[in-house]
Amino acid sequence: SEGSSLTKHVRRYDAVSLPLVILALEKLWRTYASNNRSPEEGTYTLSSSAFNVFINSTRSPAATQTARAFWTNYLTSGKDIPVKHPHASFASRKVRHYRPRLLESVTEAERKSNERGLSFQSLFLAAYAFVHAKLVSPGRIGTRFPEAVTIGVYLANRSLDVEGLLELTHPTFNVVPLKIEISVDASIFDVAKNIQRDLHKIGQIENCGVSLYEIYEWTGVRIDSCVNFLKLPEREKQG
C-alpha cells in the first residue's frame, strides 16, 4: 500500500531460519492487512527467549572456557598436528566440474551404513577425508596418508536442548573443525565410526558455538576446506 516499504538488512541466514523469517513477515503483513494495526507485543517472546538461552549457553564466559579446553585438547593432543595445506590451493587455475547426481541413488550406501550403526553423513565425510588427504599430500599418494586431516563442517544447531529452538528465526548454524584420523590401511567404516563419535562431541551445546577465529587463537588451526552435508526432506509422493 501507499507509504509502505520493506528494508533489507544484510545478515546470515540458514536454510531453517530464512523460511521462518519469510513466514513471520507473511504473518505480520496478514495481521496488519486484516486489522490495519501492528501485531500485539510479545508475539515473538518465545523466539527471543530461545535465542537468549542459545547465546548464553554457547557464548557465555563459562561456555567459552569449556569450549577452549575441549577444542585445544581435541585438535592439538598428541601427534595430531594439523596438515599445512599449500597456499596454491586457492590460487590454482584448475576448474572443478560439479556433477549432480554422481550417484543415481544412495539407498544402498545408506543401507550399508545403517547396518553398521552409522549415518550416511559420517560415511560421506569419511570418503571425503580420503580424497582430501590425497589432494593435500600428492607426493605421498600410494605410500601413506597424513595421520589426520582437519576440515570444516557446518552445524545446524537446531537439535540442542533449548525450548523453541526449532522455531527460532535467528540463524544458529556454525562452522567448526572436524579432525579425521586416517591411515592407508584404514577401513572407511572405521573412519566413519570415529567421525560419528566426534560429530556428537563437537555438536554439544558447550562446544558448538565457537568461532574459527577463536579456534585459530587457541590452537593455531586454520580451515581451508569446508563440507556442508545437507539432506533435503523427501517430497511427498503424488498419489
Image (spheres, rainbow, N blue to C red):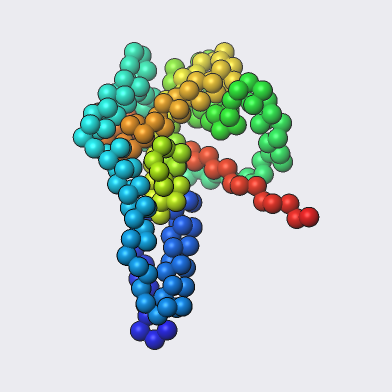
Question: Looking at the image, which is closer to me, 231 or 151?
Answer: 231
Q: Classify 214 as above or below 43.
A: above
Q: Residue furthest bottom?
A: 2
Please provide percent x and percent y for residue 128: 54, 31
Question: Which quadrant of the structure image shows residue 114?
Answer: top right
Residue 75: in sight, yes or no? yes
Please provide percent x and percent y for residue 174: 39, 41
Q: Classify 128 as above or below 187.
A: below
Identify the image quadrant of the N terminus.
bottom left
Residue 226: in sight, yes or no? no
Please provide percent x and percent y for residue 17: 44, 53
At a point 69% along the width and 29% down the height, the residue shown is 111
Q: Is residue 99 left or right of residue 50?
A: right
Please provide percent x and percent y for residue 126: 54, 26
Q: Classify 27 as above or below 211.
A: below
At a point 41% along the width and 32% down the height, the residue shown is 203
Q: Is residue 122 left or right of residue 87?
A: right
In this figure, what is the number of numbered marks? 0
Question: Looking at the image, which is closer to me, 58 or 86?
Answer: 58
At a point 46% along the width and 19% down the height, the residue shown is 181
At a point 25% along the width and 33% down the height, the residue shown is 64
Question: Which quadrant of the structure image shows residue 86?
Answer: top left
Identify the image quadrant of the C terminus.
bottom right
Question: Which quadrant of the structure image shows residue 54?
Answer: top left
Question: Looking at the image, which is closer to me, 164 or 220?
Answer: 164
